[in-house]
Amino acid sequence: MLDFGLFTHKMILARVAAEQEPMRPTSKQSRPMNSNGSTSTTTRREGSGHQALSAYIEARFDEFSRSQKDVAQYIVDHLDEVAFQTAEELARRANTSSSTVVRFSQALGFEGFPELQVAAREEYRRRVASGQEGGGSGSEPLFALDQNEFETALVADHLNVEETARKVSRRDVEAAIESIASSSRVLVVGTDQMAFFASYLRHLLMLLDIEAETVASPSQEALGRLGRIDEGSLVIGLAAGRPHPLVLRGMKLARHRGGSTLAITDATLSEVAKLAQVQLYYSSNSPAYVRSHVALLSVIQALAYGVYSRDTERYADRIKAFRLK
């Protein structure tokens, strides 16, 4: 389990490093339109069954309105700029309106311009990584543009992890890890769908010989655990959307008795976040009928790995014994 936590931890650090060093655009040569409205370059395909954004636009160019063709031409010729411009900036460069940019994005099947921009960034970064200046065949895109429901859900989860990595603060992560490692007792409170993640976090911490318990329902036993909260306790509240009253009760008790509080939530303005000394946000957007908890799982495993990394020699024997089981 902790091996996946290592992967997630490294992924978050790599993402932070990438954000700190902006990508420099490479020079490109403009590709003029032919008289028949098609581009003069050969359609670029990146991998079996997948098309790059620019190739997809070129293939459908004749379907667009006159103003949409202006947007299409600009995107194909200036992908490096489009990847980082706002819709208003793109509209100004293409001599059209921002509403046209949005309608063009929707005509391609995107929900709006931000989703189109994600595809533009992915293609641009693949070009830079492969040393290309004007396109050509590169690495296969991670997701197809004509996505089915399965792929759409995977795309949402992929973006959720990226969004979580962007918004998570290294200072808050380090504070959370310090609180977990230094507390004499950890109490993870999560009800309903959060009960599973509370139990899993407890499992990861128990592997490190950290005393951890869960509160998942208002049972007599669970309420007894809340009653034992003291100044040496850390209460971790898990919430998706509106927090359960039991989660709020645990956080309030910890604050009243001098304990520490940590909130892991998908709503930065959540009531449980207001009660926490340290807050970690995760993105839970999903096209499905339930919230996505992929990013939450990543955060939990990365936290556990962070605690483990503080003193690997101390935990080595316990982890070795677990892996041998």
Image: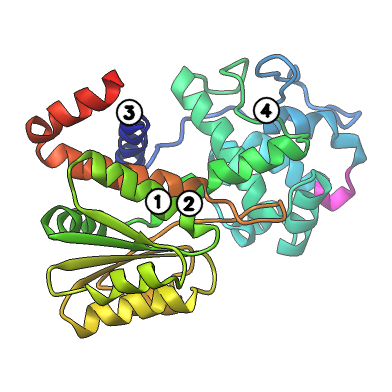
Is residue 269 something that shows in the picture? no
Is residue 288 something that shows in the picture? yes
- Where does label 3 land, which residue? 3
Find out whether the residues at labels 1 and 2 contact each other: C-beta distance under 8 Å: yes
**Magenta stretch bounds:** 64-68
Amino acid on which the number 2 mark rests in the picture = Phe
For the N terminus, give its image quadrant. Answer: top left
Foreground tag (4 vs 1): 1
Residue nearest the observer in this picture, 85 or 14: 14
Element type where label 3 sits in the image: helix
Work out how far the residue at label 3 is from the one at label 4, CA to CA, in angstroms: 33 Å
Foreground tag (1 vs 3): 1
Q: Left or right: where does residue 127 sit relative to residue 231?
A: right
The circle drawn on residue 196 is 2
Q: Earlier in the sequence, mark 1 or mark 3?
A: 3
The circle drawn on residue 52 is 4
Element type where label 1 sits in the image: helix
Residue nearest the observer in this picture, 160 or 251: 251
Q: Left or right: where does residue 231 sit relative to residue 5?
A: left
Residue nearest the observer in this picture, 152 or 46: 152
Q: Which of marks 3 and 4 is nearer the N terminus?
A: 3
Q: Which of marks 4 and 2 is nearer the N terminus?
A: 4
Q: Earlier in the sequence, mark 2 or mark 3?
A: 3
Near mark 1 (Cα within 10 A), the count class, few <14, some 14-19 or many ≥20, is some
Work out how far the residue at label 4 is from the one at label 1, CA to CA, in angstroms: 42 Å
Residue 15 x %, y %? 36, 41
